[in-house]
Image (spheres, rainbow, N blue to C red):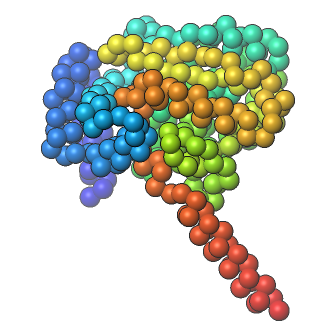
Amino acid sequence: MTGIFNSIAVAMLYLLNKLPLKVLYCFADMIYPLLYYVIGYRRKVVRKNLRNSFPEKSEKELKAIEKEFYANMCDYFVETIKYYGMSPEEVRKHIDFKGLDLLYHAIENGHSCVCYMLHTFNWEFVTSLPLFLKGENIVAGAVYHKLRNARFDKIFRDMRAQYGADNVDMKDTLRRIMTIVKDKKYFVYGFMADQLPKVEAMNHWVNFLNQDTAVFTGAEKIAQRVHASVFNLTLVKVGRGKYEGIFELMYEDASKCEENEITNEYFRISEELVRKYPATWLWTHNRWKRGRASREAFEQRIAERRKRMTAGEK
């Protein structure tokens, strides 16, 4: 049954992909009230996240952000459908990158580039970055989380690689980067480090949007290991279907930074950006569902397991 459902879904996506984007935006306008008012897709999670993140805002202000967010999410759906197979000329009409000279400067000085990002709409367009870069010795791409559904995972991987982006599964990131370095090339990789780590990876915490937040530190460790320059890539929606990706240098050489300095700065900047563009961040993600109690319970289970193993050896 799952296979049949997947086949139907893929066929529908294929048919929708053939429609003009203007028509797809009309479709987005139609599914918005269905998704928001009728289905209420993850609305409880969105409202809880908004309320906890912006306690100073009124219910009216939060509701306005909520509605705009769902409208943006509907646009994300149809834009992503159309993005697969879009010509390079068409892509350039939808996104432009600022600050590329900063990337080139870092590379000229012998540094690869670790670029921190947020899940802000429409992050899929960022995988077109190779169209905007010059130089055969530059490998551009992003670290991604593999989807559970193998068929849709392949669709997204193919879509994100269609302009030459080197997309790497998170568990293979360091191995891939060390290969690039060994080949005497430079990488420009995007790291979307705003998601919730698994409980076993909860090793560092920050105050983010008024909440105690477990965060990933892997991107920082990789950047320090290879002496990479660190950038923040801000994605701004400047119009319907039009985006700007703005590169800003955070650190010229990550190896000179203190432990967690880069991660802390990324989340400081991220909070400023979410507050500035609240309706474009992915609020449906249950970002704070696991806290320190989950980590403490995990550590207790590990300690008890070791205790049992030690007792068994005796």
Tell me residue 222's x, y (percent).
74, 37
Looking at the image, residue 1 lies above or below residue 306: above
Total residue callouts = 0
163 or 292: which is nearer to us? Answer: 292
Q: Compare residues 259 and 134 and report the one nearer the observer.
A: 259
Position of the N terminus by quadrant? bottom left
Q: Position of residue 216 (x, y in %)?
A: 63, 44
Residue 184 can be seen, yes or no: yes
Quadrant hosting residue 302: bottom right
In the rendered structure, the answer to whether residue 235 lies left or right of residue 77 reads right
In percent of width and height, residue 107 lies at 76, 15
Front residue (pair 222, 290) = 290
- Residue 299 sits in quarter: bottom right
Picture coordinates of residue 50, whole percent (x, y)? 37, 40
Above-or-below relation of 314 to 279: below
Q: Is residue 33 left or right of residue 272?
A: left
Q: Residue at x 57, y 55 (%)?
A: 198
**Residue that appears at 16% across and 40% down:** 37
